[in-house]
Image (cartoon, grey):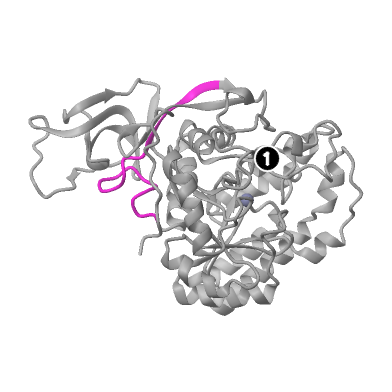
Amino acid sequence: MSTTNTTASGAPDAPGTAQDFDLVIRGSKVMIAEGTGPLEVGIRDGVITSVEPLGADLQGGEVIELAPDETLIPGLVDSHVHVNEPGRTEWEGFASATRAAAAGGVTTIIDMPLNSIPPTVNTEALAVKRDAARDQAFVDIGFWGGAVPGNTADLRELHDDGVFGFKCFLLHSGVDEFPALEVDEMETDMAELARLDSLMIVHAEDAHTVETAPQDFSNEYASFLASRPRDAENLAIAAVIERARRTGVRAHILHLSSSDALPLIAEAKRDGVKITVETCPHYLTLTAEEVPVGSTAHKCCPPIREGDNREQLWQGLQDGTIDCIVSDHSPCTVELKDLDTGDFGTAWGGVSSLQLGLSLIWSGARERGIPLEQVVEWMSARPAALARLSRKGGLAVGKDADLAVVAADDSFVVDVNKLHHKNAISPYEGRSLNGLVRRTYLRGQAVDGAAPTGELIRRES
Ligand SMILES: [Zn+2]
């Protein structure tokens, strides 16, 4: 690795003399884009203003020396979170979600436009969301808009009001107030978003394929898996690629589960279609074969698939076909998971993993010989690039001092009652994971879970 030797201001900072920084963090393992090594990080007014080799003796109002087992990483950016407030605040809320985020090393979330009421499909609804979030943000929060039938005229206003892009569904979303688009309607909206240089993010499962799949549900996971076949994803992804190619829009495939779609996506990327793809911790860590009978905590859409599919997704990440890993944190109340019957047909679909993402992915990566730097790139730099957040997603001069301290070799056992998200249900209960987040900093301030210092962020123009 090489070290940087720069300061944000042109002024000579004369390391070792003046008390130039509000906070200095020193450690033998500090992760910058070039690699991990012994560095000192100087922070002023919430911004990283200096990164120097360890020994430079930067002086600050507060100086923190990392323990030998600690790595300082850039805070993660999670661009796929359903906070559900207002409207379904009993499912999740801004305070609990952002406390969970901070505890997991996530310093920026972007909230999905549905499951809250009203859904974020016009600027009035966006204002309602912001009012709900404003005083209870423990990390930074941005918002996606929604593209639904009939709101094409609202997209520009929402864009101008700072949303990072627009989500649409190609089949029933699960909530009636956020209807799906027909493929032609999606193309109309894509054309509008191409004019705005915005981004269309798509829940890509084909409605007809799901409607005609077996719907013979029981408490066996296989009954649910059969109802959401890979073809539903493959067909819908092909449609997104075709319409993205035609309109020139930036398009993003949400929560990829079907590895069968990887060659299609790789080919589209080679052809210059502006398409990006995310997958989620549950598809990379869990398998259909091991879901216990009646364990509806594992139900999500698209579904967790077989072990060989999981390995193909890891391969897709490593060869660059998949761009990033985000949570799709989508909670509900414990009652809605129908744990008493364990019926995979009626239980709400969604996995809560905002607090565990880094540990889950690091545990899986390490088993496969993938370094922590790669994990952080997938979970921080890449989602920040997707949302064009130039101040996030890296530990570098000029970026916000959003940081996490991770003990990569520490292990812990998941106890759902100790997680911060609102409803104590998780498919990871009892699982042993590596990588403990010891502290999280937002703009150079340690997040304490008491004083909400997060900001509501907008698309950079
Ligand atoms: Zn989602």
Q: Identify the residue at image location x=64%, y=51%.
A: 115
Which of 120 and 77 lies nearest the eye of the viewer? 120
Which of 109 and 256 lies nearest the eye of the viewer? 109
Residue 434 drawn in magenta: no
Check disc 1 and report its element: helix, strand or loop: loop
- Left or right: 342 in relation to 148: right
Mark 1 surroundings within 10 Å by alpha-carbon count, few (fewer than 14), some (14 through 19), many (20 or more): many
- Left or right: 60 in relation to 374: left
* Residue 270 seen in this snapshot: yes
Q: Identify the residue under disc 1.
A: 332
From what the image shows, is residue 108 above or below residue 447? below
Residue 390 drawn in magenta: yes
| Total residue callouts | 1
Q: Identify the residue at image location x=40%, y=59%.
A: 459
Residue furthest to the right: 216
Percent position of residue 446, x then y = 35, 30
Residue 209 location, quadrant: bottom right
Q: Is mark 1 within 8 Å of ligand 1?
A: no
* Residue 109 seen in this snapshot: no
Which of 252 and 147 lies nearest the eye of the viewer? 147
From what the image shows, is residue 5 above or below residue 128? above
From what the image shows, is residue 77 above or below residue 170? above
Q: Identify the residue at image location x=53%, y=50%.
A: 111
Three-letter code for the amino acid on which mark 1 is drawn: Cys
Which of 308 and 245 lies nearest the eye of the viewer? 245
Q: Quadrant of the N terminus?
A: top left
Q: Quadrant of the C terminus?
A: bottom left
Magenta-highlighted residues:
389-411
Percent position of residue 420, x then y = 55, 30
Percent position of residue 74, x then y = 38, 40
